[in-house]
Image (cartoon, rainbow, N blue to C red):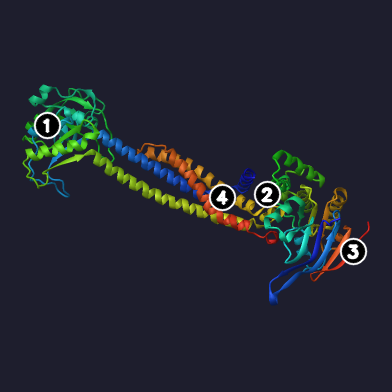
Amino acid sequence: MVLTTVLMALREIRRNTLRSVLTMLGIVIGVAAVIALVTLGRGASEKVTNEVSSMGVNMLTIMPGAQRRGPSNVTAAPLTLEDVKALTRDVNVLAAVAPTSSRGVLSVSANRSWNTSVMGTTNEYFTVRNTQIELGRIFADVEVSGGQPVCVIGATVRRELFGADSPLGASIRLGKVTCLVIGLTRAKGQSTFGMDMDDYILMPLSAFQRRIAGNRDVGAIAVSVVDESQTNRAKQQIASLLRERRRVADGQVDDFTVHDTREIVQTLQTVTGVLTALLGAVAAVSLIVGGIGIMNIMLVSVTERTREIGIRLAIGARTHEVMLQFLVEAIVLCVLGGILGTILGLGGSYFAGQAIGVPFTFLPEVVVLAVIFSGVVGVLFGFLPARKAARLNPIEALRHE
Amino acid sequence: MNALMELRGVFKIYGRGESEVRALDGVDMRIEAGEFVAVMGPSGSGKSTCMNVLGCLDRPTQGAYLFRGVDVNGLSLDQLALLRRHYLGFVFQGFNLLARTTALENVELPLIYRGMKGKERRAQAYRALADVGLQGREHHTPAELSGGQQQRVAIARAIVTEPSLLVADEPTGNLDSARTVEIMELLVQLNRGRGITIVLVTHEPDVAAFASRRVTFRDGRVERDERVEA
């Protein structure tokens, strides 16, 4: 009986193809919106996570100045190479410690120039930032210790200064300093914030300090932790070591800050999560509106088909059989709409994702949920019209014009 | 022998007090299996109400209607529906076929409710359509059929379940006289050939003349009840 009812419902839906399609449209759009937004949201969150982890594995950044809103505390003493040595020696959960200092600079090659930033650091920086060499090599020990004017450039700097040509062995001028290009790093692409992560020039810290900065300060220290689970321990050890070295009295706040990339990831994930939830909620509202649309059409359809219902009742259909027929029609419409919407939503998010550079992630549980939910919408909003149909009096229904 | 149908002091009363309308005002009637009864009377005489009661579409307000010896008043709406499904067929003035649905599918409909399987169901529907002379029209929709043909489809739908009683409400009301004669001859043939009991509601004496018994209603009561020997 249920099977024949489903077949009858399908026949009824086919008989009124245009109306059925229009009825389904609300559900199709609702489901498509939910699927697309949730899929895109998940993709965006994944992208952010990947990017931040590509910025450096388990990376912590230590900067002078207390953590506060607004401008940083300029009175805090800068970090020093001694701090770097102490960290390397005393904090045993660190895999690499890299001092960094940077400055904006106009770089000039044979016939082109480019505004970028130059950073003085050590070879440890490549480990901390998870940066690979594409061409050439990293710094030699003698270059680091001797403060030789050599540099490793990012992909953007290479493109702007050399185009497709090999930059190795070329000389570029950074302000008043001329320096030899010995390496090119592998491109990382754009970050979520639209920041170009390949727009930099690296040189040995000693060379930077002597030739460009003119002081012995270390702007920041980037460290990587051996294992993610050790991050909190590393932060504590770093903090106690630096408090001691910088003579911060008990009860006073740190005059330095330890930034954790995980915190950035968490913040970003929270943001994208909230956005996804919000947009998903809006889309869910449209799904409910779609359900009401179905109810509306089904109610009209019951009135329009009063005579048909009368015939069915006269022929011997029982109340619950008429009810089941209309309920099944509503459910079939909703589930069909849900399936169409899923296909549309997945396709839409795939192409939209490609357009805005978000990876496509297929979430089977969301698809199953969407189809089940549209079925539930069908039951909820099909119930009223179905009951109305089932309660008709056969005599009056047959007399209905 | 028990009558197929028996009305015992049946009242059907609509409204209350001042506005009370007695559509049936104490009707007693017995109809034996195999009869062809024409129910006549002016509009408002109660003939349609009587047909609804006989067709198990409605229950009397008062009195007893025994269908195959069972008092209909004691049955639920669903039980009435099952009675209709298994023992009754209906033909209406307005044909009442499902629009945009082929003749075959229309005739199959009562068999679907009986739970008959697809192949058998189609075969039986084809046979019923052949019985009413509609071979070759099985896949036409009502819009593609003439009035007479539509009424034949409706008759095929009514007899496809081999009912004990066929209730026809002004079946020729929308047809010209030539088609009327054709339809009436078909009904007579079903009555004589298959022994299907027929209750026919009409206000046309010409149509009633095909029946073997004529019951005339007036003001909710049976005014005349005459048998015609064939």
User: Above or below — where is A186 with respect to A297?
Assistant: above
Q: Residue at x 9, y 30 (%)?
A: A85
List x then y, in percent, for residue B36: 86, 56
Q: Secondary structure at mark 4?
A: helix
Task: Please identify the quadrant where the C terminus of chain A is shown.
Answer: bottom right
Residue B99 can be seen in this image: yes
- Image disc number at residue B100: 2
Mark 2 vs mark 4: in front = 4
The Cα–Cα distance between marks 1 and 4, rounded to whole angstroms, is 70 Å
List x then y, in percent, for residue B145: 75, 49
Identify the residue under disc 4: A330
Identify the residue under disc 1: A90
Crowd class of label 4 (few under 14; some 14 to 19; many from 20; radius 10 Å): many
Identify the residue under disc 3: B226
Question: Which residue type carries mark 3?
Answer: Glu
Crowd class of label 3 (few under 14; some 14 to 19; many from 20; radius 10 Å): few
Q: Secondary structure at mark 1?
A: helix
Mark 2 vs mark 1: in front = 1
Quadrant of res B54:
bottom right
**Would you say A129 lies left or right of A212 here?**
right
Of B131 and A2, which appears nearest the observer?
A: A2
Question: Which residue type carries mark 2?
Answer: Arg
